[in-house]
Amino acid sequence: MKKSQITVFIILSLILLLSAGVVLYFQTTQERALLEIEKPKIAALPAELAPIGQFVQSCAEELAKTAFIQIGAGGGYLDSTGLRYNPFEPTEGNGVQFAPQGSLVLPFWYYLKDKNDCIGTCDFDTKRVPVSRGEGLSIEGQVDDFVSKKLQQCTNKFKKFKEQDFSVEELDAPSVETLVTKEDVFLTIKYPLRITKGEQVYSVNTFAATLPFNFRQTYNLAATLTNLEAEHRFLEKDIRQLIDAFSKKDSKMLPPVSESDIKFGLGTVWVKFDVERKLRQVIASYIPLLQVTGTRNHRYLRAPATVLDKELYETLYNRGMIIPLNETNPKIEVKFNYLDWWKPYFNLNCRGQLCQPDSMSSTFGFIFGIQRYNFAYDVSIPVLVEIRAPEEFKGEGYTFQFMLEANMRNNEAMPSNFAPLTQLSVPKRSMFCDADKLSAGPMNIEVIDGKTKKPVDAVIGYSCGPEACPIGTASNGKLNMMFPPCLGGVLSIEKEDYQPAIIPLNAKYKEQQNISMTLEPYRLMNFKVQKYLLKKGTDWELDTQNPAPQASDEETTILLEKNTTPFEEPFSVFAQIKGSPVSKQEDYSTDIQLIPGKYHVRIYGFKYAKPPIIIPKEKRCVKADPLGRRKCFFIPEKPIVFDDKNPMPTGGAEFDWELTSEMLDSGSTIKFSTIAFGLDILPESRRKIEDLEQLGRIQDYSKEVREELEPKISSSQTRSEIFKES
């Protein structure tokens, strides 16, 4: 993370602060939140009827309290059965299933109404329920219905008053009208009763109750945060900040949004499945750190003692992750959460599952490569907003929770008019090594063979920013030349059949330097693969006793990334193994260049199924409400089909492996072992959506059977022999 990046987010935060006073535009103009509403005047009951009046009042207040608590838990809804939710694609609905298999569904107060992959005009919407009654659903109207329906159950025909010589006759069912005022909740209860005590007969029609509960304070803050998200998109800005903070030209990090590198070979490679998993972990860890200014739980975060750049840390967390408001809410707490079982919508401008930089090479007596990392993230996630007023209900506290949907496309907050971004092309570069500019040096360069330790001839190149030029050839391993002056330049040394070496070099005017470099020769290896099947009996189990060959409709991708020091050129290997004899142009499993080192190995398998592999839809029913009514739906909503257009991930493996010079020199074929998900051998009638969870356990399986996954090196085999054995 660079301090310049943090400055951008500080500016954005200031924009939020200046704009937070914009008039609420989601139905807010129809609300009476900021007005002092006059309560209806109810005639006082005679003193003789005071106990009955207090009893009705107590019942109504307790029922209203229960209603508001349930409304808070449901994001404004007492009954969420009308919300449309997708348990496997949470951002493809107007509500979110709070927990797997759970009945609680929370509404989106702001969300993308159209499909996640919409292009052109994309509509956004809200399922926020207004407070005041009017047309359609409202908070007041729901409380009306709840209290009206349950009031007779609470009064229980006034049986408790028989001991006090009261006879109470209900002349009609009660009806309640709720009024949420600026500071409390007022209930007008129309409940026609004929009350007899002794010889006295009274007729009573109307009662009143007041619930000391400031609901509007909580609701208005929820509306303010919703409108800030809709207009200023603070969630998307935070996600972009996290991507910038956790991205780097390192396969263990996220792919960078915009970086370039001078490198030979494929560059740093990621797999899209793995990037999604890492991003989900980052978001789940850091979304809870968002804070709202002026709230009860807003705290200044001090940098821990272990942090080196304390100023950068505190700037990031106390400015970059702050949502500024132009009001204070000292009695209210606000929390944000993203739960990692909510699958995000995720896309990255990769070539299939393989994510790598755009590259170009130029030949000027040597091979020079430049790589551009321009990754465009498309992300949609549901974020839980929890607003809590700890002092309400005499210290019991009150919680209101709802969902906001963050939608980022092409690394920015998704606009209402959206077009997807394709991978960028790399522009051509000009040269800067004119003869009259060679004034730095002389440079005395020595090049050594990493295997024989003898001098080796090599081509020397030098680049400065976007400019690059050849310098010359080291004869018998040595070169003495003048260079163009440059601060922040890069020296490259290349020889056919060797791993290029690149180091930073400041070439200064008339300053001599002595440089010694080592080149590691490539060893050409053939790759092949066998698989251990995950089979389903009563449960899924891994069979390591009967390895199987790769099927004809399967493809395996193998990535090896060498652990390097800061002074080594990063080195990675990419291979693809087809499941049947193919031409060399269609396959990339032979003549793989390797050098000794410690590698992190990742293997990914895909099945281009013919005939298709289908997970059928299954009808399931769950309890929908306290009355025992059941709600049935299909999981998945429609069959999941894997075929040659939509390949099925079959698994893989992930482990660390040390490859020594002796191992490389002992043979020319490496057999890798992988873990394969045997969904295709499972009868369709036994397949369930939960079976796909096994794909997420590949890393765990890799640790459990690490010895069985050890690659084996054997003597040379012809290409036809490799395929015949498979």
Image (cartoon, helix red, strand yellow):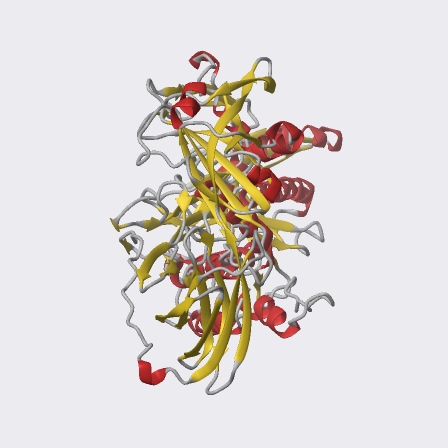
Pick whichever, 668 or 86, lies toward us.
668
Spot the residue most to the bottom.
510
Q: Position of residue 396 (x, y in %)?
A: 70, 49
Q: Position of residue 466 (x, y in %)?
A: 36, 71
Q: Position of residue 711 (x, y in %)?
A: 57, 32
Pick whichever, 90 or 105, lies toward us.
90
Pick whichever, 717 or 276, lies toward us.
717
Report the number of numbered marks: 0
Question: Residue at point 30% right, 57% down?
Answer: 424
Q: Quadrant of the C terminus?
A: top left
Spot the residue most to the left.
120
Find residue 98 and report its image quarter. top right
Pick whichever, 409 or 27, lies toward us.
409
Q: Quadrant of the N terminus?
A: bottom right
Q: Is residue 433 visible?
A: yes
Q: Is residue 415 above or below residue 461?
A: above
Q: Position of residue 2 (x, y in %)?
A: 52, 70
Q: Is residue 38 visible?
A: no
Question: Residue at point 67% right, 55% down?
Answer: 390
Q: Is residue 700 above or below residue 347?
A: above
Q: Is residue 449 above or below residue 589?
A: below
Q: Is residue 429 above or below residue 208?
A: below
